Image (cartoon, rainbow, N blue to C red):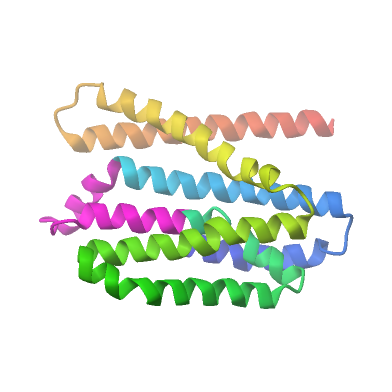
Amino acid sequence: MQISVSLNYILTPYFSSIAIGDNDSVNKKFLISINCATTLSALIFLNIVFIGDWFLALWLGDVPQFTPEVVNLIAVGFCIATIQGPCTSFLISKDKNKTIMLLCILEIVTLLSIIYPFVSLFGIMGAAYSMAISLGLSRGVLQPIIISRVLKISLLTYCVNLFVPMLVLTVVLGILYLGATNLGFTNENFTVISFATMQAVVAISAALYLKSKIIKQQS
């Protein structure tokens, strides 16, 4: 979540500086930033899914009941919000402050409306459900509709830019995790280290490939 906040601090002046430019150019740059935010957020979320139990055991030792489930549910909600991290900066640059306020109010009202009955019914899991639902409604349903209208593009186009990077990353990390778990290590620490190393190798390879493509386009 902190990464998303920091990203907003960086992008707000950037989008403000280009907001008066050509609409197609602004849209293209914004969608690139969405692709980057989606990839980063999905990377964090998928690592929580794949190795979250290992990290909790390492960090907390004896993990209280339902802790992994609660963490995963909260991670779902924050993933929905952070994959669209640049949206707040973009809306600010477009003087849509009232829209941001309404989204935040909806998120808070939804959370406060359902958290008590959910906690009464499901215990601590109810708090996680409430968080995921409030973020899902405001950031996962309404925000894409608002952003697609501001950008003047179809909702489908916007959603494709959100979910395609996440889908690709899910497949890649799934294959890497499967490979790491099949290396035959009896110590889980070595499995996690192998998984992290594979991710680093793929990330560096992808960065070098993209760099070569950009250099080729500029030459």
Where's residue 128, x and y in %?
A: 31, 62
Residue 92 among those drawn in magenta: no
Foreground pick, 91 / 176: 91
Where's residue 190, x and y in %?
A: 23, 33
Q: Which residue appears at 54% of the width and 29% of the height?
A: 205
Is 9 on the left-hand or right-hand side of 95? left
Residue 121 in the image: above or below residue 140: below
Q: Main secondary structure of the magenta part?
A: helix
Write the start and end of the magenta stretch as one range: 51-79
Quarter of the image that includes the C terminus = top right
Quarter of the image that includes the N terminus = bottom left
Residue 196 in the image: above or below residue 120: above
Is 85 on the left-hand or right-hand side of 135? right
Query: How many circles with numbers are drawn on the protein?
Result: 0
Residue 28 in the image: above or below residue 92: above
Where's residue 108, x and y in %?
A: 46, 76
Is 77 on the left-hand or right-hand side of 203? left
Where's residue 64, x and y in %?
A: 13, 59
Residue 60 among those drawn in magenta: yes
Q: Residue furthest left?
A: 62
Image quarter for residue 181? top left
Foreground pick, 144 / 215: 144
Is 177 on the left-hand or right-hand side of 184? right
Q: Which residue appears at 36% of the width and 71% of the height?
A: 114
Q: Which residue appears at 63% of the width and 50% of the height?
A: 34
Q: Which residue appears at 62% of the width and 45% of the height?
A: 159
Residue 104 in the image: above or below residue 32: below
